[in-house]
Image (tube, rainbow, N blue to C red):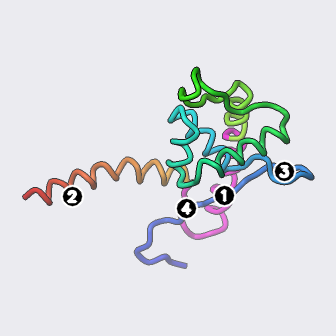
């Protein structure tokens, strides 16, 4: 089976943890906490991920309620933004460790089963980010001519 000129497919996974109370942590919430850490702000993290501040706050609070620990805390003054708590950092680290392990197995199995050189999402995403600045530079240079 051939994909013709199509690039190798990327394996995408959505993983989450839930209790009887419902889903309390998954890929999206992990991305949200990582964005809080990167931006130092829940508001900026929500904007980066294309969600409302209210939705982001609700997701964090729902997870905190099930877990019984705070995942983020205010940094300094009320306008100082947010940081991850030690529990939030640990949860992000452990979830990332689990996700990477499951993704590695999924990519390996996809390569065994399908006739294509399947790639991990993280690898494909990094490659796209690396190429994008060079493409942007080339477009800008061509446009200035």
Q: Find the residue positioned furthest to the top.
A: 76
Q: CA distance from mark 2 to mark 1?
A: 33 Å
* Marks 1, 3: nearer the viewer: 3
Which mark is drawn over residue 139? 2
Q: Are marks 3 and 2 in contact (CB under 8 Å)?
A: no
User: For this rendering, which residue is in front, 88 or 113?
Assistant: 88
Magenta range is 96-119
* Mark closest to the chain's N terminus, 2 or 4: 4
The x, y position of residue 48, in whole percent, is 50, 48
Q: CA distance from mark 3 to mark 4?
A: 26 Å
Residue at 55%, 61% (x, y): give it: 10
* Marks 4, 1: nearer the viewer: 1
Residue 105 within the magenta-colored segment of the rendering: yes
Where is mark 1, residue-wise? 13
Element on which disc 3 rests: strand
Name the main secondary structure of what is drawn in magenta.
helix
Element on which disc 1 rests: loop
Q: Is residue 98 above or below residue 106?
A: above
* Mark closest to the chain's N terminus, 3 or 4: 4
Which quadrant of the structure image shows residue 107? bottom right
Where is mark 4, residue-wise? 10
Which mark is drawn over residue 18? 3
The x, y position of residue 46, in whole percent, is 56, 47
Residue 90 within the magenta-colored segment of the rendering: no
Badge 4: residue crowd in 10 Å (few <14, some 14–19, many ≥20): some
Q: Is residue 11 above or below residue 67?
A: below
User: For this rendering, which residue is in front, 113 or 93?
Assistant: 93
């Amino acid at each position: 089976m051939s994909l013709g000129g199509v690039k190798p497919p990327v394996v995408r996974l959505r993983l989450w943890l839930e209790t009887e109370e419902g889903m309390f942590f998954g890929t999206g919430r992990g991305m949200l906490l990582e964005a809080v850490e990167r931006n130092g702000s829940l508001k900026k993290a929500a904007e980066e991920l294309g969600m409302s501040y209210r939705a982001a706050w609700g997701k964090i609070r729902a997870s905190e309620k099930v877990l019984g620990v705070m995942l983020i805390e205010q940094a300094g003054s009320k306008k100082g933004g947010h940081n991850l708590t030690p529990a939030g950092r640990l949860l992000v680290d452990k979830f990332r460790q689990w996700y990477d392990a499951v993704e590695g197995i999924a990519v390996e199995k996809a390569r065994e089963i399908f006739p294509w050189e399947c790639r991990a999402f993280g690898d494909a995403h990094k490659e796209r980010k690396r190429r994008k600045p060079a493409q942007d530079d080339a477009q800008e240079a061509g446009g200035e001519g």
